[in-house]
Amino acid sequence: MRRRTLVGAGGLWLASRSGYAQPARKVYRVGIIGYRATAELTGPEPRSPQTAAFMRGMREHGYVYGEHFVTEARGADGKPERFGSLATELVGLQVDVIVAAGNALPALIRATSTIPIVMAAAPDPVSSGYVLSLGRPGANITGLSFGGVELAGKQLELLKELVPGASTLAAFWERGGPLNRQAAEAAARARGWRLLVLENRKAGQIEAAFKAATDAQAGAIFVPASPTLFVQARRVVELAARYRLPAIYEFRSFVEAGGLMSYGVDLSDIWRHAAAYVDKILRGAKPADLPVEQPTKFELVINLKTAKALGLTIPQSLLLRADEVIQ
């Protein structure tokens, strides 16, 4: 009898101990969709600078890769037409949240109305129809805008300041970005400049566009945000040098690749800050209630080596305003 009592007590002790066992921690799955190859976006130390910045942001919020979260990355490999199938694939995995580059957003919006989506640098999300308003997005999508439309006038002014004698300025555009085109054309008209708009639909047309700008005697060229041009940054920069066209770019990665000048947001900083949205969503916040953030800081980066190669003297007024001058 005594033995049975002890066994019973032991059973109670074991049952009590198992009742205090901690439940297994959920490992969140964060989808990432971007322009580059999937291999560049994958893992805890991705090669893509923007994805690496996002991972740094996650660490800053206390997340350990493999312990608190993992990523499911899908890259378009420079082919935006692949975003549709990649979005469907990510949604099918039922990830907890998706962080997306700007041009992947239409495909994601078509693919899901329930999985939270964080925009990492999207131009004018209200006019594009991604959100109802900046203050109250209203659906399953929120995040950060890079203010591309509003910047067009400023970027053209900087280009004109760099090459004041140019009577014609050229600008690259991709079909699907009419709001940016309208903003640039309006800014040029308001200042009495002639703007030559060169549509660029695929990578194979980039050199033809540079030749068209040269044939039209454009004095300089504006290269705005574009998925095709972004992944072809080095080639774009090489062609600008070959055709001896001073250029201003939207992102500093072009200047780091040898381009002349850029004015815009720091994309890596935006991707890093996207982690703050992911953190809030994983803690229970609804995207519809998280206001979209617009950039408050823009950086001017100038490459003096490229200027010298083009035979250009950068005005002192530009050098004094530059956030970084690459020697």
Image (cartoon, rainbow, N blue to C red):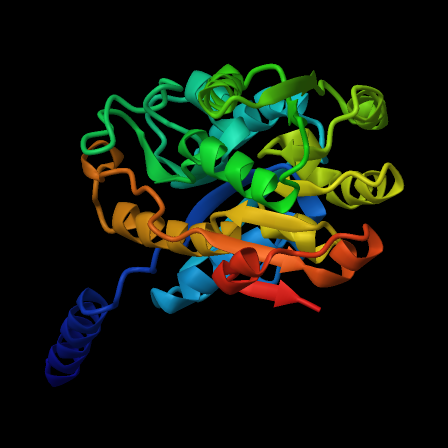
Position of residue 284 relative to residue 301, above or below, is: above
Q: Is residue 106 left or right of residue 164?
A: left
Which residue appears at 58% of the width and 57% of the height?
301
Q: Is residue 250 visible?
A: no
Q: Return the x and y of residue 136 as percentages of the image width and height.
A: 19, 30
Q: Return the x and y of residue 158 as percentages of the image width and height.
A: 54, 43
Q: Please tell me which residue lies in front, 44 or 214.
A: 214
**Farthest front residue in view:** 165
Q: Is residue 136 visible?
A: yes
Q: Is residue 56 left or right of residue 173?
A: left
Placement of the C terminus among the 4 image quadrants = bottom right
Which residue appears at 23% of the width and 68% of the height?
18
Placement of the N terminus among the 4 image quadrants = bottom left
Which residue appears at 40% of the width and 32% of the height?
150
Which residue appears at 33% of the width and 54% of the height?
276
Count every numbered label the image shows and give the total.
0
Q: Is residue 161 left or right of residue 62?
A: right
Q: Please tell me which residue lies in front, 138 or 157.
A: 157
Position of residue 185 relative to residue 255, above or below, is: above
Image quadrant in which you'd find residue 306 = bottom right
Q: Please tell me which residue lies in front, 73 or 317.
A: 317
Q: Please tell me which residue lies in front, 299 or 289.
A: 299
Q: Return the x and y of residue 119 as percentages of the image width and height.
A: 41, 37
Q: Return the x and y of residue 241 as percentages of the image width and height.
A: 84, 44
